Amino acid sequence: MKTTTGDRMPNDAAREEIKALEDKRYRAMIAGDVAVLDDLCSDDLIYTHSKADYDDKQSYLHKVGTRYFTYLEIAHPADRILVVNGAALVTGRMTAKVLVAGTIVQVDNRYLAVWVREQGAWKFVAYQPTPIINR
């Protein structure tokens, strides 16, 4: 299906908005800024971690706020941001140094981050990492 310039412009703007929101989300994670994360996250958040454990919004914000997770460094280049109707799918590689319950953990994942439109605003609703295992 061929896309006209008029069709591309809204998705281009949405992709730029999602990229800015992803940057804001990662800055808030490093800062431990629960207020910003609370605003960005959907109440239906499902945040899966590299070791297959997961949090809902309340438990994730609690862990960030109490510094159970202390994000020391994060790089998160997005390979693709696909906007389809009221959803945005972000894929890329995320590397990080995280203090988890007092232990430093090096994270190297491919990821899928999902944003949805809720009441006129983009909300972060799901995160799914896949650890990269060097062989």
Image: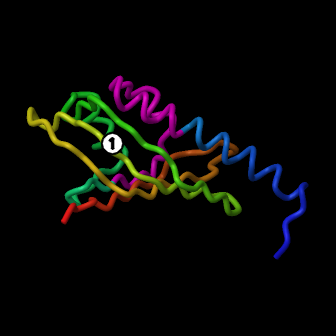
From the viewer's perspective, is 105 left or right of 28?
left
Left-right relation of 85 to 122: right
Question: Residue 81: where, in percent of width, then height?
Answer: 60, 54
In which image quadrant can residue 112 be found?
Answer: bottom left
Which residue is label 1 attached to?
A: 58
Q: Magenta residues, as a range?
A: 22-47
Residue under the image location 71 percent in, 62 percent down? 85
> Which SS class for mark 1?
helix
- Asked where in the image residue 60 lies, by quadrant, the reply is top left
Question: Residue 122, percent across and down?
Answer: 61, 45
Q: Amino acid at mark 1?
A: Gln
| Image: 11 above or below 85 | above
Q: Residue at x 20, y 43 (%)?
A: 106
Which residue does the image show at 24% across and 36% down from the upper left?
97
Residue 19 on the magenta segment? no
Q: Is residue 38 above or below residue 131?
A: above
Q: Is residue 32 magenta?
A: yes
Residue occupying image coordinates x 29% and y 40%: 96
Q: Is residue 106 left or right of residue 57?
A: left
- Nearer the observer, 118 or 75: 75
